[in-house]
Image: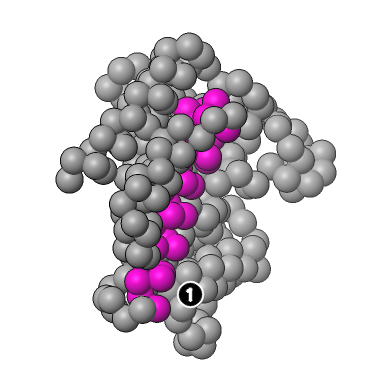
Amino acid sequence: MRIPLLLYGLALAVRLVLIEQFPYPAYPDSAYYVDVARSLHAGAGFNIDFVWIFAEVGAKIPADPMLPIPSNAHWMPLASIVQVPFMAVFGDVAWAEALPFALIGAIAAPLTWAMARDFGAIGRVAVGAGILTAVPLLSAVYLVQPDNFSLFQPLVLGSLWLGARALRGSSPWAFLGAGLLAGLATLSAKQRDALHLFYFKDMTSQEIADALGLPLGTVTSRVDRGIKALRRFFGLPRDGLDLT
């Protein structure tokens, strides 16, 4: 356990230094994720008080424009969600918004080492891979931004590793783990909400449409796309889809 812990410590130290130097969102995309996180923290849900791209409002100027608007019509919500517990504990401060990206992103370094060893790399090659992941030179400045970079590193690495282990026959559960990690990273907020109501609240598509104020066809399409995305990640057959 010493090597993976040292690699995690190195990666975390690099990221904490970056936060100390500049904890704020550095560009519009990261500012967007912070704005959504603040809305969630305030109890206002997935909403934003500005229009970043027209995909958020149906790709056109609305007939009755108003703010705030529902968020994440285009951007995936995970980068906002992970900030909320830290805001709840430490308050709405910049370093708390950046901290989860350092803690989660640092996992990529020991994970890279473990993958390399599992794939047969000799010790020094695996350690070198872990160090390069911990200290990725010019791209390091992005790794504590409230964006998807730090989140996708361990999620994608874990998904690829588990997928490879499943193909080798190491564990039948590895496919499930790979699909969960990939799905966590890529399932959109709109698909997530529709699937949640459809499966966990046992609502019909018409009931969901009434609850969300959406056309029935829109709800059916979101549930369909969400299920198809999960089926692709899990490697399941495409039949048996019930959208009644």
> Is 137 placed left or right of 113 in the picture?
right
> Is 37 placed left or right of 62 in the picture?
left
The range drawn in magenta is: 139-167
Observer-nearest residue: 209 or 138?
A: 138
Whether residue 146 is in magenta: the answer is yes
Q: Which amino acid lies under the numbered mark 1 shown in the image of this protein?
A: Arg
Q: Position of residue 216 (x, y in %)?
A: 61, 66
Magenta stretch: helix, strand or loop mostly: helix
Count residues near mark 1 (Cα–Cα under 10 Å), then give few for <14, some for 14-19, many for 20+: some
Taking the spot 46% from the left edge, 78% from the top edge, the residue there is 235
Which quadrant would residue 161 be assigned to in this image?
Answer: bottom left
Observer-nearest residue: 83 or 105?
A: 105
Taking the spot 40% from the left edge, 38% from the top edge, the residue there is 131
Which residue is most to the top? 21
Which quadrant would residue 175 be assigned to in this image?
Answer: bottom left
Colour mapping = one colour
Q: Position of residue 217 (x, y in %)?
A: 65, 68
Whether 170 is drawn above or below 5: the answer is below
Whether 56 is drawn above or below 14: the answer is below
- Residue under label 1: 231
Q: Where is residue 234 in the image (x, y as percent from the top left)?
A: 43, 73
Q: Where is residue 229 in the image (x, y as percent from the top left)?
A: 53, 68
> Is 128 placed left or right of 7 in the picture?
right
Q: Is any part of residue 42 visible from this angle?
A: no
Which residue is most to the left? 1
Whether residue 115 is in magenta: the answer is no
- Disc 1 is placed on an element classified as helix
Taking the spot 55% from the left edge, 26% from the top edge, the residue there is 141
Q: In which quarter of the image is the N terminus?
A: top left
Q: Is any part of residue 179 visible from this angle?
A: yes
Taking the spot 36% from the left edge, 79% from the top edge, the residue there is 168
